[in-house]
Image (cartoon, coloured by chain):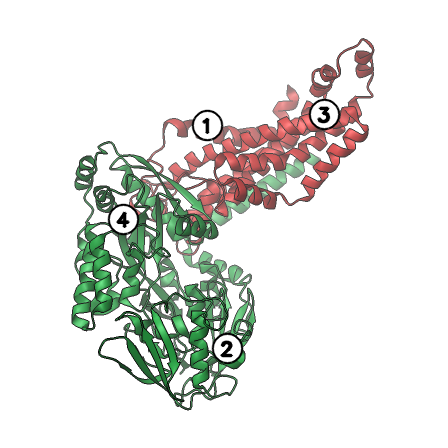
Amino acid sequence: MQKYKKNINLLLGAGILLLFFGMMVVSYFYTPYDVNSMDIPNKLQEPSKTHIFGTDEFGRDIFSRILKGSQTAFIVGLLTVAIGAFFGVLIGGIAGYAGGLLDEVFMRIMDALMAFPGIILALMLVAVFGPGIINTSIALGIIAIPSIARVTRSGFVQQKESEYVTAAKLIGVKPYKIMFKHILPNISSQIIVALSIAFAIAMLAEAALSYLGLGVQPPDPSWGRMLKDAQSFLISSPWYTYAPGGAITLLVLGLYLLSNAIRDIMDPRSK
Amino acid sequence: MLKRKYVLSFILIMVLLTISACSGGSESESGENGTSSESGDGTVATSGGSSNGAQEITVRINDDPDFLDPHHATASISFQMILNMFEGLFIPQTDGSLTEGLAESYEVSEDGLTYTFNIRQGVRFHNGEELTMDDVVYTFERLMGLNGGEKLSNNFDNVESIEAADDTTFVMTLKEPNSNFLYSLTALQSAIVPKSNDGKHNESPIGTGPFAFVNYAPGVNLELKKHEEYWEDGLPYLDKVTFAFQSDDQAAVMNLLADEVDLTGVPGHRVPEVEGTYNVTHQNNNSSLIITFNEEKEPFNDVKVRQAISYAINKQDVIDSVFFGYATPTGSNMSPAMGDYYLDGLQDVYKRDVEKAKELLTEAGYPDGFKTKITVSSHNDIYSSIAQIAVENLKEIGIDVEIEVVEWGIWLERVYFGRDYEMTAIDLTGRPSAYEVLNDYVSTNDAENFFLFKNEEFDQVMADVLRETDREKQIEYYHRAQEILNEQAAAVYIADYQILWGSKQNITGLKSYPFWFHDMKEVKFE
């Protein structure tokens, strides 16, 4: 327990993440203004008491849209991680435990996926299946698979020679039980770290796709899209970029801090 | 040890964030920073704007031309550039009228069927050859597909025959009278090209225009040079014209400020940055910005539904937020740029009135509204911005609209050609002829009537106007046609938006046409 309290990365990372999580939960029940209602005579207002982050080019309250945008960020992040985790752990687990030809085939496919620049793959998938939150998440989830599979595989390769695995095999435990009941919990820390990094990458990628106009569709707010819209007003209304840019930076920073902290705590060798 | 590093880097990042947030207070400072960092990555590859008095201009264009061959080109952006190289029998003017070009004079027979043109003598192509009757005949045969090739234009379907009466007299005979026929004889529809260049019109285009083709570098620029033997004495003034391609509107302004281009379109909200140091000219684009419907689909086949939507949409909000006020409200497909063909007053018919819109919807049998989808292209942000405003406005009368943003190619395929859509927002580009501005709505015009608008009276009026030779009466017909579009709410007519051109202050002679054309003929640096 002492270990947790002393770790400042953990405190900061968890703090930031909790803050955004809180924002997301609140935004389901309350936003200061309706996120999509327009007030065109009051467009592009500077931050003030009535609009703490100002208003956008349609007179919509930027703070409300940032709150609502956190939903998009979390939904995309969680869905991506769920897809990536399911297939990544499955593929990595089988490849690592079975070894041999199966391992070769699976991992070379993963290498091929990894060699492909992620954002281009996502662009292609979104272009084929159409934009939107779900399709974006699926595209990003596919991209997340290889890195999770690799981490899982290396864990399995290490663990499968351990004595407890040999013992389990000798008393006739079924392979899938050994894999997911015995080995998986032992490598969970590595996987959690990989997942939290995948989460951060997914959020950045969603922002990038929305920035390119292919992610979340208007009028639903997304931080990436807000950043894109703000770009045209960079000189006349620079404060418009601060809120979405700051939100993306802070949340990704929080996730990285957290994943570092988890690794430090869980890894017995880092002292 | 390692942990301390993380903490340190974190603190550093926070400090950086705070600093950048603070600098927001002094706008001018951050503005300057933005300028200097952005101009560095400007992608316009040119030798720089003209300085030290050379008569060379660099004009920024959004995109590459689709074709350099004037008979194949369809994109308005192509004509914006290539009209400097080509001329037709007639030349369109800035007020939408026509003057004689390569035809020195002409006569129309009493029955309106036979057109006789005297071809101008002493005109030379860019390659030095003299313009002959052979070239004129060749041009029209090529367009009509009479010389073995494929037909390149539908404008001459009504032509019975063409012939060269003698070396200077060209005769065209029509099947039916058409008062709009001369408008198909400009370089937009029938640029005169030399027979000797057959097969190479796209690789090395040759015309009689004031500027000659030098080089086309895809994605970079199109270079033109002065046509020394141009038939109008003393013109053009410029020695060299470079059309540099830059798709990003924001970066284009940086290119102007960095002296890389001499002339570019400027987004409305950035006018304050260039005003004062550059000339800003407002061009009434003659376009028709509309939100429109597939009028064969329910519920848009009901005129009351279309009128309700017209009442519900706040056109002034679109003008203020998307065009920053730089747009002229319209009430039909025609813009005030068309002079006396334009019927004033229609723009006030559908003033925003939510109550009236609800009443009309109830009368149409949709008291609780309905669900629909608006499909817009992503190639320009204005369309999704307009869609967002429409969604908010229509929500108030109970219509639930979903936005679908697709790529330009998909939009063309699905919406414009495929007609597989419910609602969309688009601007119809201006044309010099009043007939062509309105004929998109003729029910037999399969190619352009993507709204599937069908109105018998409108079809009749548009057929009558072609048979009418008296200009005053033509105007009456065109006015009636505009009234019908307005009464029937064939589309939600929003505005003719202006294009704002930012140019160096020592540039003179820029002209604005009611269609897309960067005319460089009379441009010069003082």
Picture layout, residue B71 above or below residue B526: above
Q: Alpha-carbon distance for marks 3 and 1? A: 35 Å
Residue B507 in view in this figure: yes
Task: Tell if the residue under mark 2 belongs to the same chain as the one under mark 3.
Answer: no
Mark 3 = which residue?
A: A93
Q: Which residue is mark 4?
A: A41
Pointer 2 local density, CA inside 10 Å: few below 14, some 14–19, many at least 20:
many
- Horizontal side of residue B223 vs B396, given as left or right: right
Mark 3 or 1 closer to N-term? 1
Q: Which tint is chain B?
A: green
Query: Are marks 3 and 4 in one subunit?
Result: yes
Tell me the SS state at disc 3.
helix
Label 4 is placed on what type of residue? Pro
Residue at the image point whose x is 35% and y is 64% from the top: B499
* Above or below, comparing residue A181 to residue B465 in the picture: above
Residue A22, numbered label: 1
Give the class, few, some or many, for how many residues have Cα within 10 Å of label 4's Cα (few <14, many ≥20). Answer: few
Q: Chain of mark 2?
A: B
Q: Tell me the kind of residue under disc 3.
A: Gly
At label 2, which amino acid type do we have?
A: Leu
Task: Give the spatial CA distance, label 3 vs label 4.
Answer: 58 Å
Q: Pick the residue in front: A75 or B440.
A: B440
Looking at the image, is A181 positioned above or below residue A259?
Answer: above
Residue receiving disc 2:
B224
